[in-house]
Each structure stands twice: as C-alpha cells, then as structure tokens.
Amino acid sequence: MDISMDPAELQVIAPCLGKRFSGINASMIAVMPELTRHIRIAAMGFHIPEGIPRIRFRQFWRHCRRGPWRIWHARRNIDMLAGLVLRHLLRFKLILVFTSAAQRRHSWITRFYYRHMDGLIATTSKAASFLYREAVVVRHGVDATVFFPPEDRAAAWAKRGLPGRQGIGVFGRIRPRKGTEEFVQAIIQVLPRRPEWTVVVVGQTTEEFRPFELRLRGMLKEAGLEHRVHFTGFLKDSAEIPAWYRSLRVVVCPSRVEGFGLSCLEAMASGCPVVATSTGAWPEVITEGQDGYVVPCRDVNALADAILRITEDPPRISEMGQRAKEKISSHYRIEDEARGIFDVYWRLLDGYERKT
C-alpha cells in the first residue's frame, strides 16, 4: 500500500476510475495533500501520482469490506456506479458523496446516480443550480506553495530562450473543446500589433487531435507567425507547469465549455491577469478590468480585442496581476477547499455513526 497508515483505518476512499486523465483528476490530486491533514484518505484507481496516498483495489477489498462506515467520494458517473454496487450489492459500509462541477443539465443516468448519493458537493453556485438536490458549494482552491509569482518575471521569461520580451500563455490539451482554434485565430489578429510578445501553448495533443494541431500550425504558418508561437507538447515533470505560469505575463483561458477551470486560478495565483471565456467558474472568479476580462465563448473578435486591451499597458499588467494574486490568496485557498470538503465528510460520518 502506498500510504503509511493501516488500510483498515482509512476513513475516505477517493476513487479515480476514469481511464482518461482530465481536470477531474487534477482537481482531486490538488486537494488530496491538504485533506490528509484532516482525515485518513487514500485515492484508488488510475492516474494517481507519487506522493498521493493510494490504496490498491485488492487492498481495499481485503481491508475495507468490514469495519466502520467510510466515505466513498465519487467525481464521475463510473465512480458513483461503483459505489452503489459496492454498497447495495456487496454490502460495503460506504457513505456515498458526489462532487459536480458541470454547469449544464445532467444526463438522466447522472441524475439517477446522484439521487442515490448521501451527500452532494458543487464547485460553484451555478453548478449547484443544475442539481435536483441540495448541494454544499465548495469552491476549488490553489496551493500557494506551488503557484506563486516569480521574484523576477522578466528573468524567468529570458531563461526560456524564446523570441520576444513577454509571453502570453494558454494551458490545456489541444482540442476544439478547449477553444484552441479560437485562440489561434485571435492571436493571428493580435501578434502583428504586439511585436514584443510571444505565445506559448502549454499542453499535449493526443493522437485523436493530431490533425487538428497540424491544421492550427498551418494557419500560423500561412500568417507568417509560426516562429512566434511555441508548443511545449507533453510535460513529463508536473513542476514545469507552475514554472511556465511564472514565466508568462498574461494567460488566456479560451475554452468553449468548462466544469470549473483550474487554469484561471493557477494563473492568477502566479500573478498573471487572465482573459477567459464565459464558462466554468471564470465569470465568478474574474473582476472585469481589475484582474482580467471575460468574453463570450467562441467569439474570436472579442477574444482578440480583450488580449489587445490587456497587453497594451505593461505597468497595468503588473497591477492587474497583483490584484489577481491577492484575490486568490484571500478567496480561493486550497486550505479552504479542504476544510469545506472535510466538513461534509465529518457531518455524514457523524450521522451514520449515530444511527448505528
């Protein structure tokens, strides 16, 4: 077992049964270390990095089939289904919790599953409004020991060895849903008017979307801008992502749809003002003109105009970045997220223990 405690003493299982890595994985991994300060918790499933408490399914089956009530914290349909089977068919003493970040009406199967959960958590008020049961709103937070501004951003950028004096970044997998095409179309308008700026696309492309990336590169080449846009590709070391935030001056979050969107929080915690589309939690996080701008999804011209506005006055960028950092430090701390989740766990555990 990849944790130091006795597996029989676990109080919370965080299943991660989806085979594809996504923002759901990233948000769970981000809060797990802080949650371990409050409760005995371990993850189980796929894409669990070193340093995160982990239990194998065989160990879970052996050590957790009997004993006290435990929390099963689901974040996907498959996690909820597994929890229902374990509890109702296999008689595991599991208290079922589901976290929803979706800002849309759920499918009938998701509604069926979450109606059988003991507790619901929503990451935003808007996400809670799409649930047909009461949910506790617990906003995602950022670990300030991981995401923070650099001492000298110009020096951090210079070490990258890229052209230009300042960088604009976009984070996430390269695919249509992430708004990568709208971003490329926008910067084709922006870069000719901002000769000192270079664009960095931080994220990988899966084989499914390789033709999509090649088409975007072709658009940049046709515009004569391919040398001013750097694609990092897959980053093996997770520490490279915070380092990229510290190298950039501005971050763009152009997604067509998001559940929450941690990249906005991570950028702001790193002292970068953000241009984001009106999806996920971003309209709730950003104060227009103070620490960033929000534009309609899929609106290339509005995206380009906002990037031009935010890059036209370098001293103002620094002021906006400072306000962004202060907002995340006061309202979106990872400690607050962990405490909110723990409060839900403890209320449910206490209730079941009283019943038995």
Image: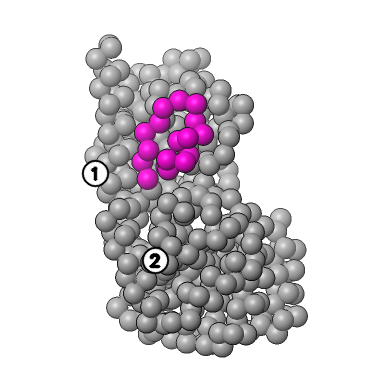
Q: Position of residue 156 (x, y in %)?
A: 39, 81
Residue 62 visible (yes or no): no
Q: Calculate the distance from the C-alpha at mark 1 to the C-alpha at mark 2.
A: 32 Å
Q: Secondary structure at mark 1?
A: loop
Residue 324 visible (yes or no): yes
Give the amino acid type for the residue marked by disc 1 in the picture.
Answer: Arg
Mark 1 vs 2: CB contact within 8 A: no
Q: Secondary structure at mark 2?
A: loop
The residue at 45%/18% (across/down) is 87
Residue located beneath label 1 in the image: 37
Q: Is residue 77 magenta?
A: no
Mark before the other along the chain sequence, 1 or 2: 1
Q: Quadrant of the C terminus?
A: top left
The residue at 47%/41% (across/down) is 126
Residue located beneath label 2 in the image: 291
Q: Is residue 137 magenta?
A: yes
Numbered mark located on residue 98 in the image = none
The residue at 44%/15% (across/down) is 91
Q: Specify start and end residues of the magenta stretch as a single range.
A: 123-139
Which is in the foreground here, disc 1 or disc 2?
2
Q: How many marks?
A: 2
Q: Position of residue 73 (x, y in %)?
A: 41, 33
**Which image quadrant for residue 273?**
bottom left
Note whether 89 is above or below 191 in the view shown: above
Note whether 149 is above or below 40 in the view shown: below
Q: Position of residue 295 (x, y in %)?
A: 55, 61
